[in-house]
Image: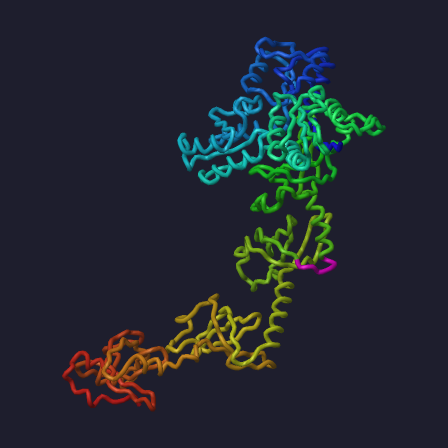
């Protein structure tokens, strides 16, 4: 019979740390106390009792001179405060993961946020967590959360912080969070399920799906062991949940070819080994098997030292930190301030759960079981190396302008400050460089002095090169009639210059619009996007004449389709002459209002009545299709009986 043993079966680092602390404290004090069961395993508790770690459920009986070991699940804050007030020495064996959640809960309370804990309400860990705030809400799963949202005192705008019991089943936590994310407008989610628990649950599910019989070993009071059994039953029809090998019988494995074995986080290695030996008839007592499980477990946890480089797997991302499994006995994490030099960067944009990351160990606290890591410090070393290489290879880098400096600007390139002189900023002389703050730019590094941490760069070299390449592309493909989408770069009284991709072309004022205009500002402004086409070009002199009018439209035909003799039109006065006024009927088509047809009285000059730009109504009195000329009359609308036959056609 084949036995598949889960790699992560047995003590997690939090349990291992608690047991070692209790053993060490008992040896130092010649006897100490523990409040309740240090971990949920009767075998371990009995072994500790034999070593002098006595158990009490009445903390009020302890006083000055007593030493108590706080269990791995944590303790009520009121109990800890009471022990401290009575002078009892406390050795805190609380799992670092649990301590971390206590801190999150306490911080949320201080910020006025509603704390929501997903877990078993009567579990010691959850009860302890709840004691670190005044009004916590504890829900066992999504059903309870949904009931609160529907019938409780829930308000969509209330600020909510969600944490999970370290041994919570992931599906329950994620389903609960999904409900609150949908209903709540201000929610912070802290994924506090222990990575060791998560890994153990995933392994158990994978193995259970492959075997005929699945054996789960652990104390019946252990929440994580109970959850393991529940997960296994979803994938295997025959699951045995036992506390030790004496609960097994041959009948359990009748007709079985493959069995699986896993164990809760508080199950000693000796019990796992005994169960495995009982299960497998083919396992012999080889030299490898004689090596104690405890020794193998110790070897599996690496030792971390401040200043060394370690590689780990991202296990969770919270609003305050990134948790990393580095295979050590310490709880390892990266503060957001140590993740990136970019203060605007979001953690989820930098790393994802499951990513492998290289980090520096900033600080190790073996007493509390923490290890602080830094990604940005290791990244900085690599970036300096990349910066130095970039100088040699003239590599184009990307950065963000962070400030205006004396004589130039500062660009942050992956956390490295690069000074760009004003002459190399790519901006015109005297331009306001502060306007570049926040912009992403491309540049080349021109000078590096790592000892002085001085780096100089040039944006201009990149933009000049890009512009030159764009110009060559334009001149190599330009042809009369070709259309471009360009940007208005500058304006004159006689036209505008449009950038069509590194090359400027001139659009004469007459080519801007079918309408008569006096200044290009009537049509466009600097920065506008304009569709243009090539009228002519001189490659040797690098001159291009562009047009913007749509020549596919015939203005005269538009007029003829819309108006006829006798119709009234709203026209715009475009030019005043001694003999009358020219008025635009449709863009590109003007008509003449003779001075005699401007008013119902005699006037000396047209400007006595009209002004350029004025809009008036006029009657179309004559159309010369051959010469494309139009006669208009304002007088005809003012005095219909007036003699209109003498109205002259435009000359």
How many numbered marks are there?
A: 0
Question: In the picture, which quadrant includes the N terminus?
Answer: top right
Q: Residue at x 22, y 83 (%)?
A: 597
Q: Indicate whether 314 appears above or below 110.
A: below
Q: Which residues are magenta?
A: 391-396
Q: Quadrant of residue 98?
A: top right
Residue 392 within the segment the image draws in magenta: yes
Where's residue 496, x and y in %?
Answer: 47, 73
Q: 89 and 519: which one is in front?
A: 89
Residue at the extreme left: 641
Question: In the picture, which quadrant includes the C terminus?
Answer: bottom left
Q: Residue at x 62, y 63 (%)?
A: 460
Q: 436 and 179: which one is in front?
A: 179
Q: Quadrant of residue 374?
A: top right
Residue at the extreme right: 287
Name the side, left or right, on which 543 lies relative to 585: right
Name the side, left or right, on which 320 lies relative to 217: left
Q: Is residue 76 visible?
A: yes
Q: Quadrant of residue 570?
A: bottom left
Q: 558 and 218: which one is in front?
A: 218
Where's residue 549, x and y in %?
Answer: 43, 77
Q: Residue at x 75, y 29 (%)?
A: 297
Q: Residue at x 50, y 68 (%)?
A: 487
**Display coloring:** rainbow
Q: Is residue 7 visible?
A: no
């Amino acid at each position: 019979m084949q036995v598949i043993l889960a790699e992560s079966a047995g003590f997690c680092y939090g349990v291992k740390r608690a047991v070692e602390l209790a053993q060490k404290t008992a040896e130092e004090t010649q006897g100490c106390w523990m409040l309740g069961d240090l971990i949920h395993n009767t075998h371990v508790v009995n072994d500790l009792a034999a070593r002098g770690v006595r158990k009490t459920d009445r903390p009020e009986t302890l006083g000055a001179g007593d030493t108590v070991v706080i269990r791995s699940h944590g303790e009520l804050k009121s109990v800890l405060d009471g022990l401290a007030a009575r002078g009892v020495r406390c050795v805190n064996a609380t799992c670092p993961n649990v301590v971390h959640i206590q801190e999150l809960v306490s911080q949320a309370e201080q910020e006025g946020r509603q704390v929501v804990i997903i877990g078993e309400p009567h579990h010691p860990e959850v009860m302890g967590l709840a004691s670190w705030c005044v009004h916590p809400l504890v829900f066992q799963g999504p059903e309870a959360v949904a009931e609160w949202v529907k019938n409780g005192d829930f308000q969509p705008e209330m600020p909510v912080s969600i944490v999970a019991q370290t041994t919570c089943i992931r599906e329950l936590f994620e389903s609960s969070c999904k409900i609150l994310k949908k209903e709540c407008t201000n929610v912070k989610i802290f994924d506090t399920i222990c990575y060791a628990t998560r890994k153990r649950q995933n392994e158990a599910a994978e193995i259970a799906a492959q075997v005929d019989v699945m054996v789960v070993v652990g104390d019946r009071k252990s929440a994580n062991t109970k959850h393991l059994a529940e997960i296994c039953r979803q994938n295997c029809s025959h699951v045995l949940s036992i506390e030790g090998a004496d609960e097994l019988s041959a009948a359990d494995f009748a007709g079985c070819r493959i069995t699986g074995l896993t164990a809760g986080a508080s199950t000693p290695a000796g019990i796992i080994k005994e169960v495995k030996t009982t299960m497998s008839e083919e396992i012999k007592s080889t030299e490898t098997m004689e090596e104690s499980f405890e020794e193998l477990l110790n070897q599996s946890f690496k030792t971390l030292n401040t200043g060394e480089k370690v590689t780990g797997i991202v296990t969770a991302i919270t609003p305050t930190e990134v948790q990393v499994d580095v295979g050590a006995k310490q709880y390892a994490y990266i503060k957001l301030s140590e993740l990136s030099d970019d203060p605007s960067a979001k953690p989820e944009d930098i790393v994802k759960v499951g990513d492998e990351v290289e980090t520096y160990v900033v600080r190790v606290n073996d007493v509390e079981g923490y290890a602080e890591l830094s990604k940005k410090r290791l990244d900085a070393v690599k970036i300096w190396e990349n910066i130095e290489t970039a100088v040699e290879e003239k590599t184009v880098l990307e950065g963000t302008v962070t400030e205006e400096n004396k004589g130039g600007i500062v660009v942050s390139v992956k956390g490295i400050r690069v000074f760009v002189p004003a002459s190399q900023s790519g901006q015109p002389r005297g331009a306001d460089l502060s306007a570049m703050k926040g912009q992403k730019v491309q540049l080349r590094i021109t000078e590096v002095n790592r000892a002085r941490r001085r780096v100089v760069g040039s944006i201009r070299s990149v933009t000049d090169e890009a512009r030159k390449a764009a110009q060559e592309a334009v001149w190599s493909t330009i042809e009369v009639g070709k259309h471009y989408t360009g940007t208005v770069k500058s304006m004159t009284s006689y036209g505008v210059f449009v950038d069509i991709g590194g090359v400027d072309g001139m659009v004469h004022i007459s080519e801007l619009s079918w309408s008569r205009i006096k200044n290009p500002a009537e049509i466009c402004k600097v920065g506008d996007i304009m569709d243009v086409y090539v009228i002519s070009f001189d490659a040797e002199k690098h001159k291009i004449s562009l047009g913007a009018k749509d020549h596919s439209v015939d203005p005269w035909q538009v007029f003829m389709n819309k108006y006829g003799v006798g119709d009234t039109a709203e026209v715009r006065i475009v030019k005043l002459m001694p003999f009358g006024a020219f008025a635009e009927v449709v863009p590109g088509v003007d008509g003449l209002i003779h001075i005699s047809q401007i008013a119902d009285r005699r006037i000396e000059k047209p400007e006595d009545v009209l002004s350029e730009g004025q809009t008036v109504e006029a009657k179309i009195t004559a159309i010369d299709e051959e010469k494309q000329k139009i006669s208009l009359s304002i007088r005809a609308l003012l005095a219909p009986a007036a003699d209109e036959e003498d109205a002259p056609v435009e000359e």
